[in-house]
Image (cartoon, rainbow, N blue to C red):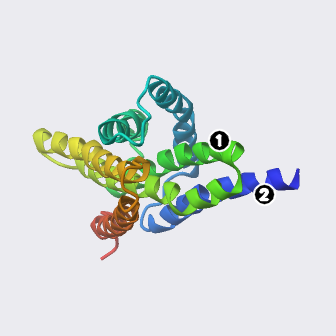
């Protein structure tokens, strides 16, 4: 019982810590905690259908890490597209059109809440199946990766709401899906393939670069905030 409780806390901690960090970085106009909780829960709700789609695809044969072509499709379509599209649609459907989404930084904040809801439930499911080792590894890889992809998505989506004309706004939305999807696909490809062990190092490089870019995007949106006092 104690071990199960510890494992659950370990699965919950990384995602909640990242949520707290992003909440603190939203310096100039804090979002409602109720809305943050709602978007977090919406992220959790889409986790199960996404994982079911992935499981179906893998069962259908798209799970051969020794075959580079299959792994490429699996990484970019089965995993990256399915997961990033689900989070993107939640972001556009709930927080994006509402009045409380009132500055570009909110794109990052709500994208991260959705993504951490997704990553946290995914973490709990993986913890129950694979135990402590996988849970600890995911705390330093998969969860920060999800957060970084979400920040990149939220950066472009946040920009889009306050961009004119509409053509430019639509371009920002396309980038909000395409850029994190591409990075996610590359990251997963290097992890999932088993043909060349050396490529695993590139996954860590992609992760590090994503975290660096995400950090820069958060700071950029802080500076752009219309609520920042001069």
Q: Residue at x 33, y 46 (%)?
A: 185
Q: Residues within 10 Å of mark 1 (few under 14, many from 20)?
A: some
User: Could you say which is closer to the camera, residue 171 or residue 197?
Assistant: 197
Examine the image and state in which quarter residue 169 appears.
Answer: top left
Q: Is residue 128 found left or right of 67 in the rendered image?
A: right
- When the figure is inspected, residue 91 is found, relative to residue 57, above or below; the finding is below
Mark 1 falls on what kind of element? helix
Q: Residue at x 52, y 40 (%)?
A: 43
Q: Residue at x 32, y 40 (%)?
A: 76
| Mark drawn on residue 125 | 1
Q: Is residue 44 found left or right of 128 in the rendered image?
A: left
Asked if residue 157 shows in the view, the reply is yes
Q: Position of residue 210 (x, y in %)?
A: 35, 62
Q: Is residue 184 found left or right of 138 in the rendered image?
A: left
- When the figure is inspected, residue 60 is found, relative to residue 90, above or below; the finding is above
- When the figure is inspected, residue 222 is found, relative to residue 124, above or below; the finding is below
Q: Which residue bears the numbered disc 2?
A: 6
């Amino acid at each position: 019982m104690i071990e199960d409780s510890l494992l659950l806390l370990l699965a919950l901690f990384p995602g909640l810590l990242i949520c707290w960090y992003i909440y603190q970085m939203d310096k100039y106009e804090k979002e409602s905690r109720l809305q943050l909780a709602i978007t977090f829960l919406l992220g959790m709700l889409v986790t199960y259908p996404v994982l079911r789609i992935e499981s179906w695809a893998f069962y259908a044969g798209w799970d051969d890490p020794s075959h580079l072509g299959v792994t490429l499709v699996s990484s970019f379509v089965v995993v990256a597209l399915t997961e990033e599209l689900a989070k993107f649609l939640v972001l556009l459907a709930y927080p994006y059109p509402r009045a409380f989404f009132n500055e570009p930084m909110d794109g990052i904040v709500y994208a991260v809440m959705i993504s951490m809801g997704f990553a946290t439930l995914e973490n709990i499911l993986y913890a129950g199946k694979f135990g402590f080792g996988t849970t600890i590894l995911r705390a330093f890889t998969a969860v920060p990766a999800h957060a970084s992809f979400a920040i990149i998505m939220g950066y472009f989506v946040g920009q889009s709401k306050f961009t004119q004309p509409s053509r430019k706004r639509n371009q920002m939305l396309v980038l909000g899906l395409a850029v994190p999807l591409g990075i996610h696909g590359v990251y997963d490809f290097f992890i999932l393939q088993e043909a060349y062990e050396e490529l695993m190092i590139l996954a860590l490089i992609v992760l590090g670069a994503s975290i660096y870019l995400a950090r820069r995007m958060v700071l950029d949106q802080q500076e752009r905030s219309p609520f920042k006092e001069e």
